[in-house]
Image: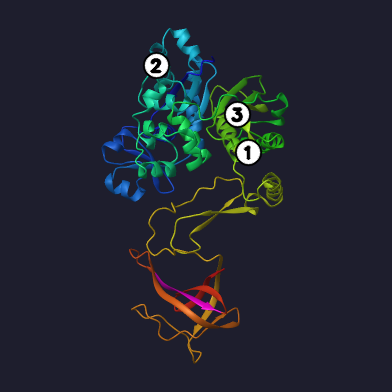
Amino acid sequence: MKDTRLLAVWCPDWPVVAACTATGTSQHVPVAVVDGNEVVSTSAVARAEGVRNAMRRRIAESTCPELVTFEHDPQRDARCFEPVAEAVEELAPGIEVVHAGLVAVPARGPVGYFGSADRAAERIVDHIATRTGAEAQVGVADSLFAATKAAHRNVIVPPGRTAEFLRPLGVHELAAPELVDLLRRLGLKTLGAFADVPENAVTSRFGGPAMRQHRLARGLPERPLDKRRPAPELAVQETFDDPISRIDAAAFAAKLLSERLHENLAARSLACTRLGIHALTENGEELHRVWRAAEPLTPRGIADRVRWQLDGWLTRERLTSGIRTLTLDPVEVVDGTALQLGLWGHDDERAVRALLHVQGLLGPDGVLTPVIDGGRGPREQVKLVPWGDERTPGRNPDHPWPGRLTRAPATLADDPAGLEDASGGDIGVTGRLELTARPKSLTVNGKRREISAWAGPWPVDERWWAPDPHRAARIQVQADDQAFLLIRRDGKWFLEGVYD
């Protein structure tokens, strides 16, 4: 039987460590990394002051006034992690980067070379500290999920006892928030309790994604081990006339080559779960790294990992020349149906190519995609990002937004409007939030409509702490079997949106 035991090397609080390393900030001060105004990583000093993950930035800063915050930057994390990955590879060849801060390697090699798992873990941790100054922990188990959890606890799990190790752990260890919430409501609070549920019951009740989490809870790999062996022609390669030495050029090359690889895989109904990245420099230096992914990689996922890896290589001091040849090799592939279909279903890839072509003609900002954002008004609740960029909100939409519309209009506008009474006079809003008259008609773009119903007004009171607070009022009206959202500001009515 094939030995599937894995050794995982984990660097605690890596986003904080990377931010401090990149900026020269001392790790002996309270530090937090925030993403969308939410804390995603903290230093030990910050945790001692009461700062926790998932806190809002404002609450974290009020809890610890000395807190130093940095914005989440996956590329920075990957760039700073490359020396750590190299240090591990010097003692345990064949590593795979799971994400910045975590690498995995088959345990058989280092355990056999150093004589035991404990001795291998000790040597690897000492070597990382000597080479990079970073702290690391090692875990060994029969699956990547279990090895990662073991590394979090600095534990070597004996062979065949992975399921026993996982049993008492809470279901929050699964990276599936909705499933975790459901399991807790069902009274299944530990991985052992979830593992005891029959597999067919999990599949029929919760679906495929929950079945994969169920396999993790049982100490099994997320997917069965009978992976397809990738055909050699799936790999894509590009030789550059001008060697790549700048990060912006690397990002452009990563995007183009990633699209080619994904097209090759999609043509065969395959998707990549382990990506090999090979580079050859102008001076003949050979570079190689494998990235492992829990889920099949999308074109964006491939491009991100290639960009992060190139950034790490190009910023190394001992790299003497630019990258002449870049090769992407799908080390492991699975059935492409594992990728969820997008907006256009099976025509998704053709639509992606069309959008990339348009973007090439008009520039990055020529094709924009909407992202649900945090905010109170309808325009604030949508953020437009260039096609291909990371679709992350600027402000967390799940945070409380007092006064936020429960249902935003389908069509946004910002046109002057008129709200008139029976005599045709303008209707205002009093200081008590009451209309000065009964609405009779609505005029937008010169067209007058009879109003059949209305709701409001509601206050819009923002920046109340500033010398020039923004005060306005919104009202919804129904006219000619259509609903409209109006806002009154500076003594005038404006159309904010139209409901379908």
Q: Is the C terminus in the top left, top right, bottom left or bottom right quadrant?
A: bottom right
Whether residue 133 is visible here, answered yes or no, is: no
In the depicted view, which residue is nearer to us: 333 or 216?
Answer: 216
In the depicted view, which residue is nearer to us: 51 or 250?
Answer: 51
Measured in 3D between alpha carbons, the distance from the residue under mark 3 to the one under mark 1, in whole angstroms, is 18 Å
In the figure, is residue 58 to the left or right of 224?
left
Identified by mark 2, the residue type is Pro
Q: Residue at x 37, y 33 (%)?
A: 193
Camera-side mark, 3 or 1: 1
Name the residue that disc number 1 marks.
Answer: 337
Measured in 3D between alpha carbons, the distance from the residue under mark 2 to the one under mark 3, in whole angstroms, is 29 Å
Q: Are marks 3 and 1 in contact (CB under 8 Å)?
A: no
Q: Is the N terminus in the top left, top right, bottom left or bottom right quadrant?
A: top right
Measured in 3D between alpha carbons, the distance from the residue under mark 2 to the one under mark 1, in whole angstroms, is 36 Å
Camera-side mark, 2 or 3: 2
Name the residue that disc number 3 marks.
Answer: 275
Q: Residue at x 55, y 18 (%)?
A: 94
In the depicted view, which residue is nearer to us: 241 or 377?
Answer: 377
Which percent across, then down, holds residue 466?
Answer: 35, 64
Identified by mark 3, the residue type is Leu
> Which of the two discs, 2 and 3, labels the residue nearer the N terminus?
2
Q: Are marks 2 and 1 in contact (CB under 8 Å)?
A: no
> Which of the two discs, 2 and 1, labels the residue nearer the N terminus?
2
Q: Which residues are magenta?
A: 471-479
Identified by mark 1, the residue type is Thr
Q: Relative to 218, is 48 above or below?
A: below
Name the residue that disc number 2 marks.
Answer: 158
Which percent across, then down, holds residue 370?
Answer: 56, 55
Label 2 Cα neighbours within 10 Å, binned few <14 / some 14-19 / many ≥20 = some
